């Protein structure tokens, strides 16, 4: 009788279409009808109309039923219960009393931090890494996948490249320690929206150096959007975690897609996990009381149950008040909540993880976050769904599990995610919170690098005040390096063995993209890029770089810029760059020590300066103006050290013509204002500069640069160097004249010398004179020879005395920068 009744119910609900389906499909339909889901079929046409669409819908329902633990029946029952609890205001933690959890707090760069880093580096050789990256960058104002977004404009490396290079750097350390090859594996969780693009990004860049069998893409089911907690079920379904355990992996590290600083803290957090044997360790940040970020707390139930988990901020304060703490969530004497902030970066012990996955199949406790239309809580603004979060994994562990946290007290050193578009970022700052934008995501990279160097004793210029996309920020010298160069504080100490002999100016840009580089003595006030191939060892000892450098130029609303520039609020204008690059194996010192009878770098520059002071500045200005008219927008002096058999010079990046015109206009305006009332002998130079600005505004095609060949070596096998004044694009024209960058003639100006830096980089304030800097636009000397050599004894770079700039010299500088 029941079967007959069900058959009649189905026939009525399906409007006679029941003949289209088999027994299993009919059984699923009957379950759905019993749970009041008849609306799924209410709009069906009579048999014979759109039958294929009806069959497709039921097939999709069958797929969803099979992919959820307990099927759609369990999903519907769970959803109804959670929605009822939400409407009635039930607290999911009722009966629990919150306590401050166990964990380790430390200062960035402290002795405790270094101790944990050392232990963590050893543990990293037994770790696997999981990147939870399921979305696009549309929320940021970026149409690509978030993993393809550049971390910073100095290196121009995307997030995925930085993450992979960081894991490979840890792998190399583990291999060196064990004396045998070690292979660390990585998993990326993707979605239908991002899977193919992520695969293409990897293919286009040869997996950024990682072997294909080291990296696994696991695609999250799009038809059942369920939150990033699904990563546990995905890992369980592949059997990867079990295989890792069998291969000696002890830890699994989970991290998010757009926090470029995560690997600055991960080694120390791994050290904490290893020291205390944590089954779960949450890498967390200091948190203000009632701040809109979840807090990590130990919850102890009246019946003896206990768990340490993330409690959402809107639940933590009421829970504290309801359990006898009348003040709720308040700051301690140091100004922070005792409950650290959750940032969804976890380290799990593999043995415990495997056991839990076998018991739960990776299913994580669910929740709902309904958006009600009104106070009646009976209608929704949009459909709601069940979700799960990966950080709720500890709910599945027994009370005896060791669950803790790791906090680095300086947030800027470990956590600066890129989550908000410019408008939302500005609104969050105005409301008193962090922007978590692409702008701060990049600038915090420079901040942590500069502060780390300052801790060592390096003389680093003070940050400038800058405004990008309405955000008023500290702009530190643009210093960055690849993970292979330094991952830990110990690494940095080895790379900068004589920190008191290194000066990095306020406007400097330093990018080191090579593992084996040691900086012993450097005076940098311009832009320097250091690169090298495998088996190349570079020592910088006594180098002075004072070129025109790179400038972070604030964008206006009307600027036609790329997406990754717009969401930052700036673009980078590369005026001059000194590139140091070696391709053949060997050990090299830069600059090379002079041979017997040859002047050293300081003496050579002094002699050259005396010679140039006799030159005619007007004729040089005319030549520079002519160069600009021919389209030489970017004056980038690339010093590349290479082997004699290399035929192609290194090309430097160029700036956009429109931005160059804007920069020219700013510089000319500044120079013209200071030229008012100048003597007759300086007016000619001012006129030439103004003429050059007019020609620059017209725009022109870019012209390739000129190459100055290296001096020929008398000895066979010597390494040679080449100085190149490179231009934006193209190959050198036939018959191109040899050229070099000249220092503008020092002209007399009765007024005090002022810098033109305020005209560069948008809203940057005028920079104060930095110590030891050569004038911008200084000639880059070609190195005569670069020989294989052992590191020399420390030699301190001697600062050159800054000269007062007259109007004529400033005008010539402006032409050069144009």
Image (cartoon, helix red, strand yellow):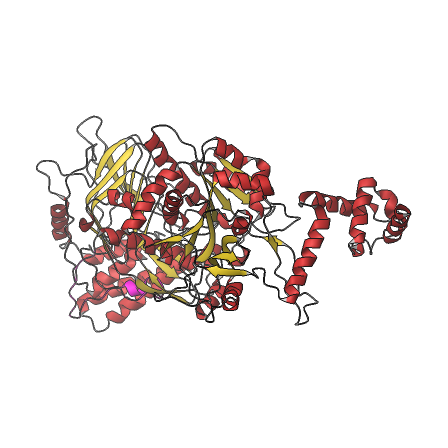
Q: Which residues are magenta?
A: 744-766
Q: Is residue 752 magenta?
A: yes
Tell me if I can see residue 653 in this picture: no
Instruction: Say above or below: 276 vs 573.
Output: above
The foreground one among 525 and 408 is 408
Q: Quadrant of residue 676?
A: bottom left
View extreme (bottom): residue: 677
The answer to whether 234 appears left or right of 40 in the picture is left
Q: Quadrant of residue 340?
A: bottom left
The answer to whether 277 appears left or right of 691 in the picture is right
The foreground one among 353 and 578 is 353
The answer to whether 458 appears left or right of 603 in the picture is right
Quadrant where the image shows the C terminus: bottom left
Residue 45's spot in the image, x, y percent? 86, 53
The foreground one among 422 and 286 is 286
Instruction: Say above or below: 268 vs 142.
Output: above
Instruction: Say above or below: 484 vs 448.
Output: above
Q: Is residue 362 magenta?
A: no
Residue 786's spot in the image, x, y percent? 21, 35
Tell me if I can see residue 551 in this picture: yes
Query: Number of numbered discs present?
Result: 0
Residue 122's spot in the image, x, y percent? 35, 38
View extreme (left): residue: 597
Q: Who's the residue at 61% across and 60% down the image?
A: 369
């Amino acid at each position: 009788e029941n079967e007959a009744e069900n058959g009649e119910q189905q026939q009525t609900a399906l409007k006679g279409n029941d003949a289209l389906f088999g027994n299993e499909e009919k059984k699923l339909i009957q379950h759905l009808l019993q749970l009041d889901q008849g609306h799924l079929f209410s709009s069906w046409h009579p048999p014979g109309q759109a039958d294929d669409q009806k069959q497709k819908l039921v097939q999709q329902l069958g797929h969803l039923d099979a992919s959820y633990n307990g099927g759609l029946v369990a999903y519907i029952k769970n959803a109804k219960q959670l929605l009822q609890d939400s409407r009635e205001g039930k607290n999911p933690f009722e009966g629990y009393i919150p306590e401050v959890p166990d964990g380790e707090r430390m200062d960035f760069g402290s002795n405790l931090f270094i101790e944990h880093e050392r232990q963590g580096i050893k543990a990293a050789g037994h770790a696997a890494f999981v990147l939870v990256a399921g979305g696009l960058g549309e929320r940021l104002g970026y149409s690509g996948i978030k993993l393809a977004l550049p971390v910073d404009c100095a290196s121009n490396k995307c997030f995925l490249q930085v993450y992979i290079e960081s894991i490979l750097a840890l792998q190399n350390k583990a291999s060196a320690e064990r004396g045998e090859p070690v292979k660390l594996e990585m998993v990326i969780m993707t979605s239908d929206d991002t899977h193919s693009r992520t695969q293409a990004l990897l293919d286009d860049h040869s997996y950024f150096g990682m072997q294909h069998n080291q990296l696994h893409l696991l695609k999250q089911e799009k038809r059942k959007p369920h939150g990033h907690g699904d990563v546990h079920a995905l890992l369980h379904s592949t059997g990867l975690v079990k295989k890792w355990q069998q291969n000696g992996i002890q830890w699994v590290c989970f991290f998010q897609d757009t926090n470029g600083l995560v690997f600055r803290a991960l080694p120390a957090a791994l050290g904490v996990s290893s020291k205390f044997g944590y089954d779960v360790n949450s890498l967390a940040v200091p948190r203000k009381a009632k701040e809109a970020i979840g807090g990590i707390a130990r919850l102890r139930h009246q019946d003896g149950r206990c768990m340490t988990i993330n409690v959402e901020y809107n639940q933590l304060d009421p829970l504290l008040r309801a359990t006898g703490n009348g003040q709720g969530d308040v700051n301690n004497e140091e100004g922070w909540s005792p409950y650290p902030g959750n940032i969804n970066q976890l380290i799990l012990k593999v043995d415990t993880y495997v056991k839990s996955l076998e018991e739960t199949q990776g299913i994580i406790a669910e929740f709902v976050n309904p958006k009600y239309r009104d106070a009646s809580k009976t209608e929704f603004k949009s459909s709601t769904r069940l979700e799960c979060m990966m950080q709720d994994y500890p709910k599945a562990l027994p009370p005896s599990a060791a669950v803790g946290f790791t906090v680095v007290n300086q947030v800027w050193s470990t956590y600066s995610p890129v989550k908000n578009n410019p408008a939302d970022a500005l609104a969050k700052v105005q409301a008193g919170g962090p922007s978590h934008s692409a702008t701060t995501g990049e600038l915090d990279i420079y901040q942590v690098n500069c502060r780390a160097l300052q801790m060592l004793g390096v003389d680093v210029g003070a940050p400038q005040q800058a405004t990008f996309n309405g955000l008023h920020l500290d702009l530190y010298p643009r210093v960055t390096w690849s993970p292979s160069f330094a991952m830990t504080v110990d690494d940095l100490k080895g790379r900068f063995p004589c920190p008191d002999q290194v000066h990095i100016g306020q406007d400097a840009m330093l990018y080191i993209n090579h593992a084996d580089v040691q900086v012993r003595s450097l005076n940098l006030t311009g832009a320097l890029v250091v690169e090298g191939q495998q088996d190349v060892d570079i020592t910088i000892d006594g180098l002075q770089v004072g070129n025109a450098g790179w400038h972070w130029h604030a964008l206006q609303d009307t600027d036609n810029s790329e997406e990754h520039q717009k969401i930052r609020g700036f673009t980078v204008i590369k005026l001059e760059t000194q590139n140091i690059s070696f391709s053949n194996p060997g050990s090299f010192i830069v600059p090379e020590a002079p041979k017997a009878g040859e002047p050293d770098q300081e003496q050579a520059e002094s002699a050259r300066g005396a010679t140039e002071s006799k030159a005619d500045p007007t004729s040089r200005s005319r030549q520079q103006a002519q160069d600009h008219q021919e389209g030489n927008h970017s004056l980038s002096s690339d010093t590349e050290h290479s082997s004699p058999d290399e035929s192609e010079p290194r090309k430097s990046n160029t700036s956009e013509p429109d931005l160059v015109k804007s920069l020219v206009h700013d510089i000319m305006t500044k120079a013209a204002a200071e030229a008012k009332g100048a003597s007759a002998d300086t007016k000619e130079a001012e006129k030439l500069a103004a003429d050059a600005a007019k020609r620059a505004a017209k725009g022109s095609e870019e012209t390739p640069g000129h190459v100055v060949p290296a001096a020929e070596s008398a000895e066979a096998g010597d390494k040679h160097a080449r100085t190149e004044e490179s231009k934006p694009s193209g190959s050198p024209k036939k018959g191109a004249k040899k050229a070099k960058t000249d220092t503008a003639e020092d002209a007399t100006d009765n007024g005090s010398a002022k810098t033109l830096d305020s005209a560069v980089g948008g809203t940057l304030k005028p920079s104060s004179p930095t110590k030891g800097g050569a004038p911008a636009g200084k000639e880059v000397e070609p190195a005569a020879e670069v020989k294989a050599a052992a590191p020399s004894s420390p030699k301190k770079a001697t600062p050159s005395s800054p000269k007062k700039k007259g109007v004529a010299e400033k005008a010539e500088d402006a032409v050069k920068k144009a």
